[in-house]
Each structure stands twice: as structure tokens, then as C-alpha cells.
Image: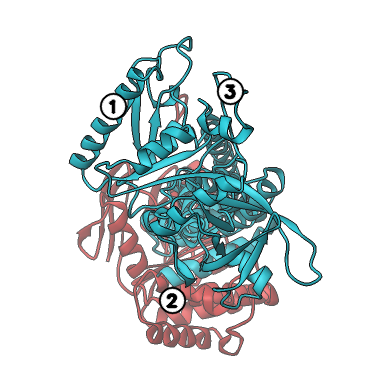
Chain colours: A cyan, B red
Amino acid sequence: MFNYYLRLALRSMRRTPILTALMVLALGLGIGAFMTTFTVYYLMSGDPIPHKSGVLFAVQLDNWDPNNPPTESAKDVQPQLTWQDGQNLLNADTPALRQVHMYASGAIVVPEGDEPPFDETIRATSHEFFAMFDVPFLYGRPWDQRADQDRASIAVIGRELNDKLFSGENSVGQRIQLDGNFFEVIGVIDDWQPTPRFYHVDAGGSFADTEQVFLPLTRAIDEPMGPRGNTNCWAPINEDLPVMEAFLQSECVWTQFWAELESPEQAAAYKDYLDNYARDQKAAGRFPRPLNTFLSDVNAWMEVNGVVGNDNRVQLRLSFLFLLVCVLNTVGLLMAKFLGKGGEVALRRAMGASRGAVFTQNLVEVGTIGVLGGLTGVGFAWLGLRAVETLYRGYQHLVNLDPLLLIVAVGLSVIAAITAGLYPVWRVSRLQPAGLLKTQ
Amino acid sequence: MLKMSDISKVYRTELVETHALRELSLHVDEGEFVAVTGPSGSGKTTFLNIAGLLESPTSGLFELDGADVGRLNDRERSRIRNEKVGFIFQSFNLIPDLSLADNVDVPLRYRGWSGVERRRAIGEMLDLVGLGSRQNYLPSQLSGGQQQRVAIARALAGKPRFLLADEPTGNLDSEMAGQVMLLLEQINRAGTTIIMVTHDPELAARAHRNIHILDGRASDLPLGTHSKVMHLPGREAARV
């Protein structure tokens, strides 16, 4: 019977094309608006590295101004570390399986040939970045601890940059020129875009592209390559020292620090280590505030940094309310449509259709409208996401409808249509056929 | 086959109580061709709706083939309606955007027959009414008489025990009405019971039996007296 009902549904929709189009449009708009905000919200709040998010921890130490308000949670502590604290932890014998100290920078890339120079983002990092974050390699390999110690002039580059500079060929052994200095390419990473870009989520950067050049941290400092991204200071910098030296010794925070901790016991031991480190620093005259050290795994870190803002939640709620308004409009349109076919319903009842059969037949029609509304909604969502992409810089990784979201959109539309249609369909199935047959 | 005993039907609103049928009793045997007459508002249509299980009586006993069908639930009533009753309406009630074959198919769909069975029944019935070659036509491509023949084919397709015809020739000119009446007589001769509501004394005279309904009560009329009754005022007719 389903095929028969489907045929009747399509025929009925052709019979009232304007009413049908209005319903499909109403549902499509509601679904489109909701799916646009939901897609952004879903990808924003997604786990960027699900297989490891529970064992990767961002490290926070509180070296800040004692006059600041008291600390109640990790949100009240600076999300970055000073250079000296990062280096102290990196070089210490801690309980962590791996540690990474890094910062964001940039340089002018000078291509060989006639291509003009261009600016490129750089991640200056200690060597375990690649293993810790499971970075996939297309060619070559990451560097090792020795290269860090030797301050080697080597680089790992991204696939996009490799395509640009070397036409996608294996560029291991080639050289790239950054700010006038040459670096040997030892590896090319494959497409890799954790969303959000959890390892560095400062303001505006949560959804930025991954960097295209990775250099040993020590080498970048030697250059020196200055930081790009938030740099916060609360104490004056020693003006008697050279600028870079003074900056590295300052209380300015601008580096990111992560630890890989395999078990709760290891995490507890690492936390103890951090507390002891902070006590040592207090004893040395630093860290004037109470003892505030924090370890946050990847998902907690997204919360601490407010990656999904309240605005996004409000938008999601508003778009859901808009969807409800569209559904209510659809209820009215469905009432008009179904009560208009009372004569046919009465005839079918006279021919032996039970109320249940009439209900099911019309529910199939409502579901078909829902499917069409869902497909229209996917179209509107695509347009909405393109608008988000145009209006908001840095959201380009959040504006793709994946297959799961397509299914969700159509499913949601069918549910919305059936919800909207339940009352009209019930009403039409309860019509008394006797009176309607006479007036046909 | 069809037996009604003391059937009453009362329609109630907040302000008014209308007695459409008052302790109506009648019995129709298998194979009969019964004409039901009566003035407007006398209860003919209500009688037809109850006979066709489209409405339930307020009180009284309604039996079909010996079984009490007056108090069944919707599903049971629908099943019996589908299997035992065929409806023919004054305004044909064909679905305009379905082909003739699809119109005839409507009751068969609810019967659960296979596609082969349905196609065979549709072909046979449209052949019977002389429209076998026009299965894919739309109703709007036919004359009124032809449309009523399609409606008859639809009513007969599920091989019902009886046909309920409500003014089946009311919308037709005399020539087409005659053709439709001939077809109904042919169907009746083949064994199908027919109960036909009509205002036309000539058509009523062609039935085997005439039942007159007045003020919600039914009475048998001797054949041939129908035309006289039709011209009498309502109260006097009740005494005929």
C-alpha cells in the first residue's frame, strides 16, 4: 500500500501546486536556517581529535598580577605560558609521555623562479608536536630531539604549500626560503585540519587554518621569529637587555604548552609536578598569586576558551524557534489542503477505507512534503553556510554540510512535517463521510 | 440478507434534536431490486447511510447476513462496507485526476487483492459497462452517462452483496438515465441486490418492490401505486 499512497501523495501535490510549494518552502526555510546554525554549532563543538582528546592536556600556570581578582577556575588564568616556564617544563624530567612547547609565527616565503614572495603562517614547535597530535605525513618525517637541540635549519611543510612551491612533488631535501634564510624540507604533512584548531585557540584563531610551515622552536627563536597571536604582559620588561632576550625572560605569556598523559594516575602525578614547580617559582620570587595550576583535556580546553560562544547558542535557539514558526505555518497550510479534499476522503471511506487507512495515506503525503522540504532546506542551508563563510573570516572549516548533516536535515524535515501534519491528518480521517458524499 | 428492526436515528446539537428515522423496520432479500421513495427530508439518505454502514443507528437492530452490524468498530464496518456494499451516487463521485481504471481500482486497493486480480476485475467491470477500451481516460473526457457507468463499474468491482444507489440517474438526461437503468436491471438479473433511492416514479415502477419512507418510517407500497403516492401530500401518503 505504501507505493499506492506515495502515488496518491504525488498526485495530490500536483493537484494543489501552489499550496504544496508554500509548505515545502516554509519547511525548507525553517530547516535551512536551523541547519545553518546547527552545522556551525555542531562543528564548533565537535571533538577535533576524538581518539586522543582524553589524554592530551593543555597546561596553565598562574604567573599573573597579584592585584587581579581571585581565580575561581581555569577560565580566570592566562591560557598561555611564558617562554621561560614553557622551556623549564619541556626540559624537565616530568611524568608526561610527551610534552610540546610552541608558538605561532610567520615569515615571508620567497619562491624560486618568478613567483612573487608571500606571507605564510609558521608554527615553531618542539619535535613531539607531530607524534602527540597524530599529524599525518605525505612525504618524509618529523624532526627529532637532536634536531631541536642542534637548532637545525629544517622545516616540515603543509601539503598546500608543497603544491604551491613544488607542484605537489616530493619536496624532501629541497629548500625553502623564509625571511631570507634557507630551511631544508624534511617532511610534508598531508591534509590536516583539526576543527576547532584545539592546540592554539586564542581569540579568532579557534577555526583558523593549520600552519603551512613547522620549524624547530629553538631555531625559530634564534632567527628570531616573533610571535603572531595574543601576547599578554603584566610586568615591565627589562629594558637593559636586548629586546628578544628581555622578551624571553619577561612575564609575558605567548607560548602554548601541551602534555600527553596516558592515565588518570599519570595526570595526577603531572599535576603534582606542576604544583611543585609553581611552589619553586614562588620561592624564587615569581608567581605572586595563590597556587593555580590547571590541566584541561581537549574538550575541557574548548570550554575554558569559550570556543562555542553564547552567541552561537542563542543563534541555535533562535533558529529552532524560527523552525517552530515555520512548522506552525505548515499546520495551517496542511489544514487548508486536507480539509479541501474532504470529498475524496469521504468517497474512499465509502469504498471501504478505514479511518486508519485514510490517516496513513495522508501521513505519507505529509512525509513526502517533509522530504521535499528537507531537500529544499539543504539548499537553503548551503546558501546560509556560504553566507557565513563570506561574512565571518576564519569559519571556512565550519561551513560544509557533511553526509550525516544532510541526513539529519531531511530527517528533521520529515519529523517537522509529520508533527505539523498530525492534527490536520487526524482531523481529515475523522470526517463524517455521509454528509460529504451528498454534497460532492 | 439486510434486516432493520426498529431503527432510529437522532441527530443532536446543543439546541435541536432531529429524528431522521423513527423505529424503521424493513427486510430486503437477496436478489431483490428495491426502490426507496419519499419526499425530501423524509429520511431516505439517512436510511441509505445506515444501510451502507456510513452511519450507526441511535437505536434498533441492523443485521447483514444474520450478523448484527449496527455497533461494530470503524475497522470492522469499513471491512464489511468494502466487501459487501457498493455505492452509486447521483453526482458519480469519480476522482477527477484518476484514470477510469484507477477510479475502479479504489475499493479494490482496500480489499488487499493482488495486482493481477485487481487488473482482471477492473477490465471485466469496465467491459461490462462498455468502457473497456477507455481505461486510461480521465472522467472529464466522458459524458455524464458514461461517468455513471464507470461509477457502477467501481461499485461492482469488488463483487459486493448489494448496491446502494442514491438517485443514480438524477443528473442524467432521460436517454442516459434509461441506459443506466437498463444496466442496473442487467446487474440485478445477474444476482446483485439493489436498493435504489429515487424521486422518479417511472424508475421506481421498474423495481421489484417499492418502499416509501415518510417522517423516518418505512412502508411497503404495492407496485404501481408509487406514482399516486408521489403526488400526495406527505401525511396522506403515510396512510396509503
Q: Residue at x 43, y 78 (%)?
A: B157
Q: Secondary structure at mark 1?
A: helix
Near-viewer residue (B90 or A327): A327
Identity of the residue drawn at 44% across and 68% down:
A141
Q: Chain of mark 3?
A: A
Give neighbour class at mark 1: few <14, some 14-19, many 20+ (Cα, 10 Å).
some
Q: Please provide percent x and percent y for residue A30.
A: 59, 45
Task: Please state the horizontal and vertical placement of residue A38, each as a whole percent of the image.
Answer: 52, 45
Number of the label disc, if any, that sits on residue A15: none
The residue carrying mark 3 is A237
Identify the residue at image location x=63%, y=50%.
A385
Q: Which residue is mark 2?
A: B156
Check residue A275 in the rendering and tell me which mark sits there, or answer none.
Answer: 1
Q: Chain of mark 1?
A: A
Q: Is residue A388 visible?
A: yes
Disc 1 versus disc 3: distance between alpha carbons?
Answer: 26 Å
Please say if A296 is above or below B223: above
Pick whichever, B137 or A67, lies toward us.
A67
Asked whether, in this view, residue B26 is left or right of residue A149, the answer is left
Instruction: Chain letter for mark 2, please.
Output: B
Q: Position of residue A134 (x, y in %)?
A: 39, 59
Q: How many marks?
A: 3
Task: Say whether residue B170 is visible.
Answer: no
Q: Which-is-in-front pick, marks 2 and 3?
A: 3
- Amino acid at the residue labelled 2: Leu
